[in-house]
Image (spheres, rainbow, N blue to C red):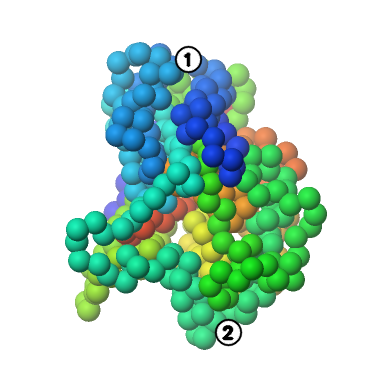
Amino acid sequence: MATKLARDVYVIGVGMHRFNNERLASAAMADVAGMQALDDAGIGFPEVGALYNGYLGGGLTSGVGIAKEFGLTGIPVTHVENASATGSCAFGEAVHAVAGGRVDVAMALGFDDMNRMGGLGRSGGRRMGAEDVMLPAAFFAMWATRRMHDVGTTAETFAAIAAKNWNHARANPLAQRRADHEVTIDEVLGSTMISYPHTSMMACAAGGGAAAAIVATREVAERLSSGRPLVRVTASQQRSETYTDGHVFLGAVIGPAQMTRDTAGDAYEQAGVGPDDLDLVQVHDAFPVEELVYYELLGICGDGEGDRLVAEGATRLGGRIPFSTDGGLTARGHPGGPTGLAQIHETTLQLRHEAGARQVQRARTGLCHMAGAGSVCVVHILQRTEG
């Protein structure tokens, strides 16, 4: 049973360095994101009680080294890594540090540059399986073609999801991919084929970037709010793969589908809300088949009904339940360590009603979902309250 957090936890500051493909120094990007978050919160680094760094490609001491740039305060600094879910897990650790009474203020900071990484996820000395010799694009392509067979999903539906996310990113100055025109379904379908049915414009943008979030107790949040709406973390849930009869452990890229359904169920129970209460959602949309399936696994619609949501425009800005409002992994980008924290950054802005041209009207509740290779799923629910 998912119990409520022991202490109320609020996001008091967020920051982000633009996701990019420019091979910038990760430490420099992390410094920008962290300082922005501190400025946004209205505090100095000495007020932070713990720092959780999320990165995949940094060195052994990267996180501690970056912390020294903020100040030699003696606080605990912890490196968190969980594949694509790294930033989400770092945020979760910060939330639970505050909720559990360890500290009153905690920071989660994610940074990476996929262009500088090599050999991630390989087997080393162990026996190799299919997941070690096949690129993720191949796994997602098989997932997509299976859905086309089972449900009748078309390549046009996948392209429509990708085009939506490209167009959302046009209103996000921090996105890696920003088209100078309205992206069409035909344009997405006509781009270079990566692994059928996915084209290059359907594949997530892998580059560099950084993002940060600072969480605190209600007392601290109210002291710093200056009348600004408060953003409360009402659910922070994480799961790994669960055994079932006949289970086969294949090291799938993102694990069994049931894992997302179960993690979301835990989060809804902890927050005291349901899918119908959500105003916007951020998901792990490395390829559009993921976003499509997550419509169903998160309970936004019934099984096999996600295609209808796409056709109706329900998940685009202005629709009933916008997904990937900042462009998602597809267009905002997926550097690894900061990806999940970029979702928190976007959702916090949305709930404060500070998202500008991509603002979801009257947004009060947002869900952030990330899956990580090796079968990890993280779901957070954030809600707006008045200061």
Whether residue 358 sits left or right of residue 284 in the image: it is right
- Which mark sits nearer the N-terminus, 1 or 2? 1
Callout 1 amino acid:
Gly
Neighbour tally class for label 2: few under 14, some 14-19, many 20 plus, Cα within 10 Å: few
Q: Are marks 1 and 2 in contact (CB under 8 Å)?
A: no
SS at mark 1 in the image = loop
How far from the left and from the top, in percent, is residue 368? 49, 49
How far from the left and from the top, in percent, is residue 197? 58, 75
Q: Residue furthest left?
A: 126
Whether residue 48 sits left or right of residue 318 in the image: it is left
Q: Residue furthest right?
A: 181
Residue drawn where x is 50% and y is 16% of the image: 43
Please say if 379 is above or below 289.
above
- Which of these two is toward me, 212 or 56? 56
Task: Say which quarter of the image contains residue 258.
Answer: bottom left
- How far is disc 1 from disc 2 in space, using C-alphas? 54 Å
Q: Is residue 361 visible?
A: no
Task: Say which quarter of the image contains residue 96.
Answer: top left
Residue drawn where x is 60% and y is 71% of the image: 193
How far from the left and from the top, in percent, is residue 321? 63, 58
Q: Is residue 355 visible?
A: yes
Circle 2 sits on which residue? 152
- Which of these two is toward me, 180 or 7? 180
Circle 1 sits on which residue? 44
Please say if 80 is above or below 141.
above
Quadrant into which the N terminus falls: bottom left
Residue drawn where x is 50% and y is 85% of the image: 150
Callout 2 amino acid:
Gly
